[in-house]
Amino acid sequence: MKNFLLYKNIRIISLISSFLIVLLTFIVLIFFQQKSFIIELLLIIIAYLVSLLIINFNFNVKELFSVLIMPSLIVFLFFSFLTLYQSLYQNIYLIIFLGLVYFVFLYASFIHMSIINVLKFEKVPLVRFSYTINYIIITVLAYFSFLYSFLQKDIFLILLYIIIFAFIIIFENLISLEYEVKDRVLYVCIGIVIFLILGIFFLFYPISIFIAALSLSLVMYIYNGILLHNRISRMGVFNYFEYFIFSLIIIISLIYIPSWGIAGHL
């Protein structure tokens, strides 16, 4: 009952927390206009502490490294890219747009987290909707995570980031869907192997890092989608068609986009 009462007030907590984190991020970036590791770390810690508050400090080890870390990952990625591309927030309208996107991602992540927590004790409405929203969020985060990985200078660092981000995103999805321990281990290992192989492949494939990151994020979309439908509903004809189309887009793009491919100069 205590957790459900907290859930009733979670919207206010999430709204205020998300707004303050976004506001602090832009204040630091606009006035200091440089990357501050201390400030970034502070914002990440704040996001993590809010996560602990939202679930009423009722967590176990698996959640410590999965569900709770997603808001911190959102803060890390937004802060890193806004620092890297400072021209993005020199326009007031663009600042408002980026701030809204940043806010929505944080807010949705906090709400999803609270629903997952309350589900341990009783049923709550909009559970399926929460899973869907989280599915979309982690797919977008996957793109920025892999793009951030490819922006690194060292090959081993690129592959390390790909492994870490793939682990966090897949594991968070598995925890949210309440997979059994043996299944979590299996699907995480399969996912890491897939993205490690693809990461190595895209390091040498002659396409831009933006296309490489997009391709990996689409693979993540398909992989997590299969896990999602396998857990909460059966795969329908539409789902098979959807994943087939996305796979076809990836394959066709990899054939035509490279400089030495069909559309390139041999």
Image (cartoon, rainbow, N blue to C red):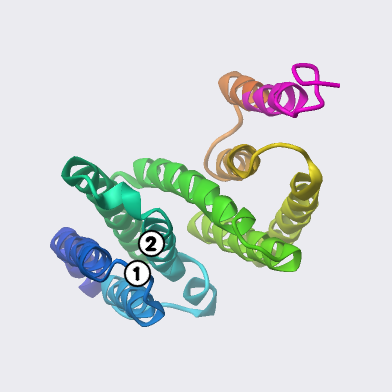
Q: Residue at x 21, y 45 (%)?
A: 91
* Residue beneath disc 1: 34
Q: Can see residue 40?
A: yes
**Alpha-carbon distance for marks 1 and 2?**
6 Å
Give the class, few, some or many, for how many residues have Cα within 10 Å of label 2's Cα (few <14, many ≥20): many
Q: Is residue 178 above or below residue 225?
A: below
Disc with the residue nearer the chain's start (1 vs 2): 1
Total numbered badges shown on the rendered structure: 2
Horizontal and vertical percent position of residue 104: 27, 49
Q: Dividing the image into 4 quarters, which one contains the C terminus?
A: top right
The picture places residue 87, in percent across and down from the top left corner, at 33, 49
Tag 2: amino acid? Thr
Q: Residues within 10 Å of mark 1 (few under 14, many from 20)?
A: few
Circles 1 and 2: CB atoms closer than 8 Å: yes
207 sits to left or right of 114? right
* Residue 263 belongs to the span the image colors magenta: yes
The residue that label 2 is drawn on is: 83
Report helix, strand or loop for mark 2: helix
User: Which residues lie in the magenta part?
Assistant: 246-266
Quarter where residue 235 is shown: top right
Name the residue located 18 percent from the left edge and 41 percent from the top edge: 93
Q: Nearer the viewer, residue 55 or 106?
A: 106
Mark 1 lies on a secondary structure that is: loop
Reply yes or no: does residue 219 show up in magenta.
no
- Give me the disc on residue 150: none
Q: Amino acid at mark 1?
A: Gln
Residue 170 lies, in percent from the top left, at 60, 56
The N terminus lies in which quarter of the figure?
bottom left
Of 67 and 216, nearer the camera is 216
